Every structure is written in structure tokens, then in C-alpha cells.
Image: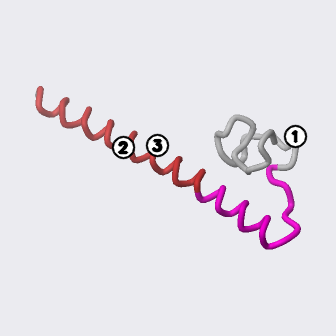
Amino acid sequence: MPNYDGTGPNGEGLMTNFGRDYCVIPTTNSEQELEFLMNQARILQAQLKQIRTKIKGVKIKKEVHHARI
């Protein structure tokens, strides 16, 4: 895993590594664990933002389509 952050080889999420390497570095102390968890939270927030943006786009396309009918 290039960044050892659990996001897969291309930052695409879990289960995208095909078992080639470890997804994360094992943490040895609470400070490392906290840093890892905070990084995971930032990644998930970014993914959620992308999902919400896609949802808005789909809703707009649906509204435009219905307005034309």
C-alpha cells in the first residue's frame, strides 16, 4: 500500500489491493493510533463529500429531465 492509510493502491478504498500488501501500518502506541484514526476520518469525510456532490448532480439531472417532459 503506497501510503499505508487503508485507501488502496490508488486511494480508491478498501479491497482494491488484491492482497498484494498490507493496507495499514500496525500502530505501536496511542499517539500513532490517534494519528491514523484522524487520517482515516479525513479520508472518509472527503469520500462523503464526493458522494454528496454526485447525489446533487443526479438530482439536478433528474429535475431537468422531468422539467422537459
Query: Residue drawn 78% across and 69% down?
Result: 31
Rendered location of residue 28, percent (x, y): 88, 68
The residue most toward the top is 68
**The magenta stretch spans which residues?**
23-41
Query: Residue drawn 65% across and 45% down?
Result: 13
Q: Is residue 10 left or right of residue 60?
A: right
The residue most toward the front is 31
Q: Quadrant of residue 63?
A: top left
Q: Secondary structure at mark 1?
A: loop
Q: Is residue 40 magenta?
A: yes
Q: Is residue 34 magenta?
A: yes
Quarter of the image with the N terminus in it: top right
From the image, tell me which residue sits under label 1. Answer: 20
Viewer-nearest residue: 43 or 59:
43
| 49 w.r.t. 36: above or below | above
| 32 w.r.t. 42: above or below | below
Q: CA distance from mark 1 to mark 3?
A: 27 Å
Q: Residue 45's mark?
A: none
Q: Amino acid at mark 1?
A: Arg
| 14 w.r.t. 11: above or below | below
From the image, tell me which residue sits under label 2. Answer: 55
Q: Residues within 10 Å of mark 2 (few under 14, many from 20)?
A: few
Q: Earlier in the sequence, mark 1 or mark 2?
A: 1
